[in-house]
Image: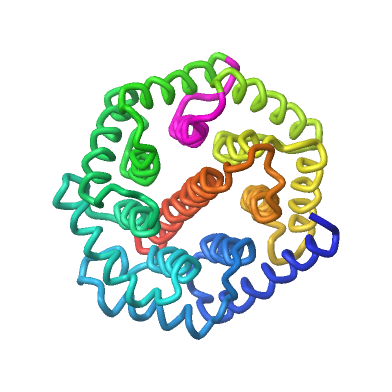
Amino acid sequence: MSSSEVNETLDLYEEIYSQLHRTFRWQDKKLFMMVAGSYAASDKRFDLNRYEQLTNVIKKEASLFSPMRSYPRFTIASLLDQRFEEPHIQYKKLVQIYEAFVKGGFKRGTFTYLSALIVLTDTDSSNTPETIIERALYIYKAMKANHPFITSDNDYPLAVLLAELNEDTETLMNRVEDYYLKLHQQGFRKGNDLQFMSHILSLDQTAASNTHITNSLTILDRLEKLGFKIKPMHYPELSLLTIINASQADLELVHSLSETLNHKKTFKWHKDINGLLAVNFVARQKVTENTLPQTGFYTTMETIIQAQQTAMMAAMISSAAVVSSSTNN
């Protein structure tokens, strides 16, 4: 990623955010930082009118108590717009898949919509939505059996991504748990963020767990030496850097990007999000340039970036829910 590409990405991010903030100024600022960042890292040109119309369509078609009448529609709209040429039509299909999830045993809510979006996006799968839903519910219940106090609805999307691997479920869950326990033994804090990290690493079926764990520790050490204060909320990004086999130069670029954002007036109070976006920008660029170490790994990496993006969006949606609740009380 050259310096000119870095500047172009940051300029695009700022411009998109500025448009969103002017139009939706009463909504949660952090949510639109994530939306703007996802557009800046994608190939889809941002069009404010198209995006606003889509959010309005989603709100209009949502039932009275649907989360799509509130802030989650902004996230869903951005992901639909980036992934489909006719997002308005695809939203109707999304609702159908969502209802299939509910019928299959998932609770109604934002994270079930995110799960439905993953199934809608997976055009390469030979499985029917019903098959994926059944496998995902089995995986989710296994996750909850292993970690009853930290597993919740926000784990639905990762369960769906794991279900799409078409791998023996017992083998898959053993790998997830192996990552979780070994990472904790190396000093990572137990909790839902570590579970997210374990899930994302498990999406890569090509590497031994010990290899990724060793690389995770190396990258963690390098990031801390660069001045990053790694918190559990950063674990999903750390797993993404691990899987792309981030070099010292990649990490220095992540640091440079995040520091640039930290010194901008608009974003300086949101350093955690700046770091998350910097990782996403670098990872997306590596995939686009096909500089990953393994050929044929592109599709897997797209899935893993999707998982990391979903984790980021889920975190922001949860945060926005807290803000909305405190404002209304």
In the rendered structure, does residue 205 fall within the stretch colored magenta?
Answer: yes
- Rendering coords of residue 33 (x, y %): 59, 63
- Out of 35 and 132, give the one closest to the viewer: 132
In this view, 217 is above or below 304: above
Q: Is residue 42 magenta?
A: no
What coloring was used for the rendering? rainbow
Q: In which quarter of the image is the C terminus?
A: bottom left
Most foreground residue, 105 or 42: 42
In-image side of 25 versus 62 (left or right):
right
When asked about the image quadrant of residue 143, the answer is top left
Q: Which residue lies furthest to the bottom in this view?
A: 49
- Answer left or right for 271 relative to 306: right
> Residue 153 location in percent, x, y?
31, 44
Q: Residue at x 65, y 20 (%)?
A: 214
Residue 192, placed above or below residue 8: above
Query: Quick check: 138 above or below 321?
Result: above
Q: Which residue is drawn at 43% across and 25% down?
A: 176
| Residue at x 66% of width, y 35% of height | 230
Left or right? Give the position of 30 relative to 259: left
Location of residue 65 with respect to 88 vertically, above or below: above
Q: Percent position (x, y) of residue 37?
A: 61, 62
Q: Position of residue 108 (x, y in %)?
A: 22, 54
Read off the magenta span. Answer: 186-207
Q: Which residue lies furthest to the top in this view?
A: 185
Residue drawn at x 25%, y 77% as measured from the top left: 61
The quadrant of the rendering that contains the N terminus is bottom right
Q: Which residue, as the protein is rendered here, is positioned at the far left?
A: 103
Q: Nearer the viewer, residue 279 or 127?
A: 127
